[in-house]
């Protein structure tokens, strides 16, 4: 036996992690997570009776960690295609900072922890829906739909739409029509939001072999479908007001934002060539994020205000 | 066959680079903080759910 003179990990064929905490935070897709936190918070706040703030906060934290688990498991499975797309090749796994095994372990630990924490903190119905959401995003969307059908984002979009329902379930213990309405908004919003990006990044998706709608059915069909979904989204965005759990202020805002969303969709539909076509598609992508953020922010704002000023909730005739 | 180690020479094992040691320290701190916050969360939620009389029970 001889002693190894070079005792570095690499020379001995051993992998030693050099991942920083920031890499693990990146695995959780913090931008997606922030949208999940925001929409789940809306689900918690539309509860007819206010939930204890500590229980609400802890539930929100569990849902956020569940979203982070989904992100990590998505990056574990998709590391091969992430490596070939410009948009994703600097993610921790393709960049070589985190191994696939680390991401898988991290994702599974977070998934189990988040589900059991939500069950303990809120209720087991909410925990079950959170578990189903993680399963749907990882096993149905990431492992199946994403690589096999151009409708991937239509069906897979449900995973991103569940958080308000999980939030509402955590707060009340039962599913309300109000939370289903929030689910519907995100569900119908997701396809035009992603297809606007896919129009511009079609080459990237094609290189990775992902059958996004523009690659499979063509840009014209994608522009038509963006317009059709936007036509459905505009009235669906009004449902919180029509159902009476958001104020007329929300109704006016949703009407104006819905009209602007349609304006962007029409422009993407009409302008099909040159740099301007790409610019309009990216503007629509950017606006779609603003659209969803403002709608949910309005509901969060008026609910928070009504909690602070109970008299206001009566004057707005809100069904508390 | 395993030969005995010389008494004056201890096995070196794997020697980490400075960057690997730094990132390991950062990960340890992050895991410690996360566990600490989780314990605090469980404690606070238990008090909220069961009330301050959680320890006041018949023996």
Image (spheres, rainbow, N blue to C red):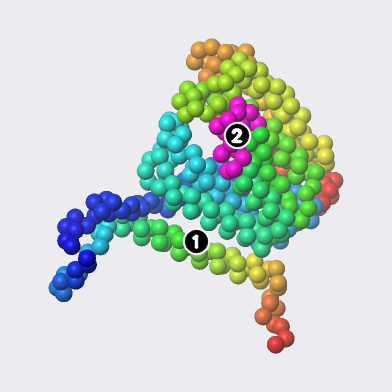
1 and 2 marks in contact (CB < 8 Å): no
As helix, strand or loop, the secondary structure at mark 2 comes to: helix
**Residue toward you, A309 or A117:** A117
- Quadrant for the N terminus of chain A, please: bottom left
Residue that lies at the very extreme toward the front in this rendered image: B1
**Residue toward you, A209 or A233:** A209
Q: Is residue A225 magenta?
A: no
The count of marks equals 2
Q: Chain of mark 1?
A: B
Q: Residue at x 56, y 67 (%)?
A: B40
Q: Is residue A144 above or below residue B7?
A: above
Circle 2 sits on which residue? A145
- B33 on left or right of A116: left
Q: Which residues are magenta?
A: A138-154
**Residue toward you, B19 or A31:** B19
* Dominant SS in magenta: helix
Separation of residues labelled 1 and 2 (CA atoms) = 34 Å
Residue A178 on image: x %, y %: 78, 44
- A28 on left or right of A137: left
Q: Nearer the viewer, mark 1 or mark 2?
A: 2
Q: Is residue A152 magenta?
A: yes
Q: Residue at x 59, y 13 (%)?
A: A271
Residue A180 on image: x %, y %: 76, 42
Q: Residue at x 58, y 17 (%)?
A: A218
Residue B37 on image: x %, y %: 53, 64
Kindly indicate the quadrant of the structure image that contains residue A258.
top right
- A17 on left or right of A33: left
Circle 1 sits on which residue? B34
Kindly indicate the quadrant of the structure image that contains residue A261.
top right
Q: Residue at x 31, y 53 (%)?
A: A14
Kindly indicate the quadrant of the structure image that contains residue A199.
top right
Tell me if residue A143 can be seen. Answer: yes
């Amino acid at each position: 036996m001889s002693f190894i003179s070079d005792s570095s990990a690499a020379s001995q064929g051993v992998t030693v992690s050099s991942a920083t905490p920031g890499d693990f935070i990146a695995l959780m897709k913090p931008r997606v997570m922030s949208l999940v936190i925001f929409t789940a918070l809306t689900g918690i706040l539309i509860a007819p009776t206010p939930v204890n703030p500590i229980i609400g906060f802890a539930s929100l934290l569990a849902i956020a960690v569940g979203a982070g688990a989904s992100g990590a498991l998505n990056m574990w499975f998709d590391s091969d295609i992430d490596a070939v797309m410009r948009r994703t090749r600097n993610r921790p796994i393709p960049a070589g900072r985190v191994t696939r095994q680390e991401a898988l372990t991290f994702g599974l630990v977070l998934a189990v922890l988040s589900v059991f924490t939500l069950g303990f903190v809120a209720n087991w119905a909410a925990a079950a829906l959170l578990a189903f959401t993680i399963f749907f995003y990882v096993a149905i969307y990431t492992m199946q739909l994403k690589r096999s059908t151009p409708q991937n984002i239509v069906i897979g979009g449900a995973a991103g739409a569940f958080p308000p329902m999980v939030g509402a379930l955590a707060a009340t213990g039962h599913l309300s029509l109000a939370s289903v309405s929030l689910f519907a908004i995100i569900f119908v919003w997701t396809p035009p939001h992603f297809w606007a990006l896919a129009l511009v990044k079609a080459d990237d998706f094609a290189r990775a072999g992902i059958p996004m709608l523009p690659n499979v059915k063509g840009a014209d069909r994608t522009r038509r479908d963006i317009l059709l979904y936007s036509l459905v989204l505009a009235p669906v965005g009004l449902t919180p007001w029509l159902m009476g759990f958001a104020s007329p202020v929300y109704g006016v805002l949703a009407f104006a934002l819905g009209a602007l969303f349609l304006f962007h969709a029409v422009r993407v539909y009409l302008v099909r060539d040159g740099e301007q076509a790409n610019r309009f598609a990216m503007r629509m992508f950017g606006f779609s994020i603003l659209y969803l953020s403002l709608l949910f922010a309005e509901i969060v704002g008026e609910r928070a205000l009504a909690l602070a000023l109970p008299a206001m909730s009566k004057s707005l005739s809100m069904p508390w | 066959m395993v030969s005995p180690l010389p008494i004056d020479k201890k096995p070196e094992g794997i020697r980490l680079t400075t960057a690997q040691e730094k990132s390991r320290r950062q990960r340890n701190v992050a895991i410690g903080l996360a566990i600490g916050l989780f314990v605090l969360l469980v404690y606070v939620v238990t008090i909220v759910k069961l009330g301050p009389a959680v320890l006041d029970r018949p023996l």
